Image (cartoon, rainbow, N blue to C red):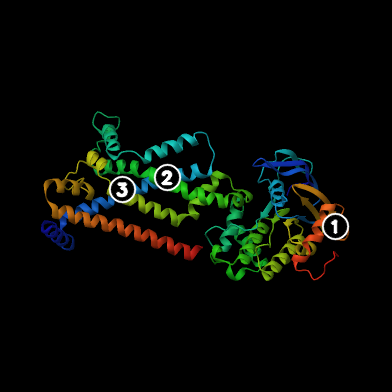
Amino acid sequence: MSDISASLALALRLVAGGDAGLWKIVLLSLEVSLAAALIACAFGLPLGGLVAACRFPGRRSTIVLLNAMLGLPSVVVGLVVYLMLSRAGPLGELGILFTPAAIVIAQSILVLPVVAALARQFVEDAWDEYREQLTSLGVSPARSVPTLLWDLRYSLLTVALLGFGRAASEVGAVMIVGGNIDGVTRVMSTAIALETSKGDLPLALGLGVVLISVVLALNAAAYALREWSARRHG
Amino acid sequence: MAEGFFPLEARGLGVTLGGHAAIADAQLAIDGSKRVVVLGANGAGKSVLLRLLHGLIAPTTGAILWAGAAARPREQAMVFQRPVMLRRGAAANVEYALHVNDVRGEEARRRAAEAIQRVGLAHVAERQARVLSGGEQQRLALARAWALRPRIIFLDEPTSSLDPAAANEVERIVGEIHAAGTAIVMTTHNLGFARRMADEVVFLHQGRIAEQTPAETFFHSPRSAEAAQFLKGELPWNGSPRTSPG
């Protein structure tokens, strides 16, 4: 017990003291997670919207595929991305294995189905309400998708924030494709895993505190945003 | 503008929804000059008929003809009982409708402003559409339909969720739209509304058109027994002080 509290005290000192090593890890973590969330949203939001509002050949298979991707084990995604990016793999020429770019790719693959599934749910609910009105105005279903995404922008921003939080918390895939190289690909989640196994509890706990704070702050921001939007837009 | 828009005809029109014939064998002709009120009790199929005519629902049997042709012309609009507004400003909602109908830029802004002016909402044009009152939203929906310059506007129970003052305002605007040369087809279960607004009445009973009669005739001496029954039964709870029709 005293071990934990001692470690926690040390951890908080690290965080508050602006430990350079710690903040470098935090910053990289936020950068790659932000990039991954943006990429996942760029593909996931339109995809979710299309599946919700349009009937097209391959729609059912897309839904099944997206649902299956929701349950993808992180380490398996890591393994597949590793194989693709390894020197002998099809994308080996890029030489991005064990770089932040590889982490972004793995995180994007893991976050995309989450974003798409949530977007689909939001758009489907809205589509029930909007369909007749938009059809009456002469808007085709395909044209409705950007309209609906824009109309749901505040709800979807919370989806993006959730995706960001999910990306920042990923461990397995990020460990495999990033390698947790100090100063290059060490992010919060992998550092916590590694430092814990090495026994450096203060650093692991310090990073844990930051990670939890980030996730909490994101959720609070998402909540506040929706409240604000509901008041402003009805 | 398309030549030969009217008459709008329904021939043997029917639709089955959820295994139930919501509209059956409807014969109808609308020449575009009169305000047509589709009247009937709740569940008679008024909204379904309107959606069929507007093209939101595909008929199971029969056909809808515009000046004898099956092609659905674009110059038509519908105002729903509860209008759906986008999460943007009131004027922006009207401009959106214009944009998707290929009216852009300055022209779209001008037409939107004009339509909003006509329904008396100029003072809230920049306000968020979804926070407007029910009556204001319904007027905005009228402005949105009007700005498209349709040849015909379908209105589904346009005043039934509004308070009397807001309903009056909507009736005034509908009258103005009609006076400006747009055909009007609207549904209601409210006899008072029908008396004030109708030039012609289409009476629906259990999914079938019981009669299509000039309003004068309809309210004095309806041709169908169902309509006579409806006129008798509806009057007391309609708020009318008189108990006999006419």
Q: Marks 3 and 1, Cα distance to the nearest angstrom?
A: 68 Å
- Find disc 3 in the rendering and name its residue: A167
Q: Mark 3 and mark 2: span between their CA atoms?
A: 14 Å
Q: Which residue is mark 2?
A: A116
Place of residue B240 in the rendered image (x, y in percent of width and height, measured from the top left): 78, 69
- From the viewer's perspective, tell me whether residue A186 is left or right of residue B126: left
> Which is nearer the eye, B183 or B187?
B187
Please, which chain is the residue tagged with disc 3 on? A
Please, is residue B83 above or below residue A90 in the view? below
Q: Is any part of residue B5 visible from this angle?
A: no
| Type of amino acid under label 1 | Phe
Can marks 3 and 2 be said to lie on one chain? yes
Residue A84 seen in this snapshot: yes
Instruction: Judge whether B182 appears above or below B246 on screen.
Output: above
Q: Are marks 3 and 2 in contact (CB under 8 Å)?
A: no
Disc 1: which residue: B218
**Location of residue B232 with respect to A184 vertically, above or below:** below
Left of B141 or right of it: where is A148?
A: left
Local packing at callout 3 (Cα closer than 10 Å; few below 14, some 14-19, many 20+) is: many
Q: Quadrant of the C terminus of chain B?
A: bottom right
Q: In the shown orientation, is residue A31 left or right of residue A42? A: left
The residue tagged with tag 1: helix, strand or loop?
helix
The quarter of the displayed image where residue A15 is located:
bottom left
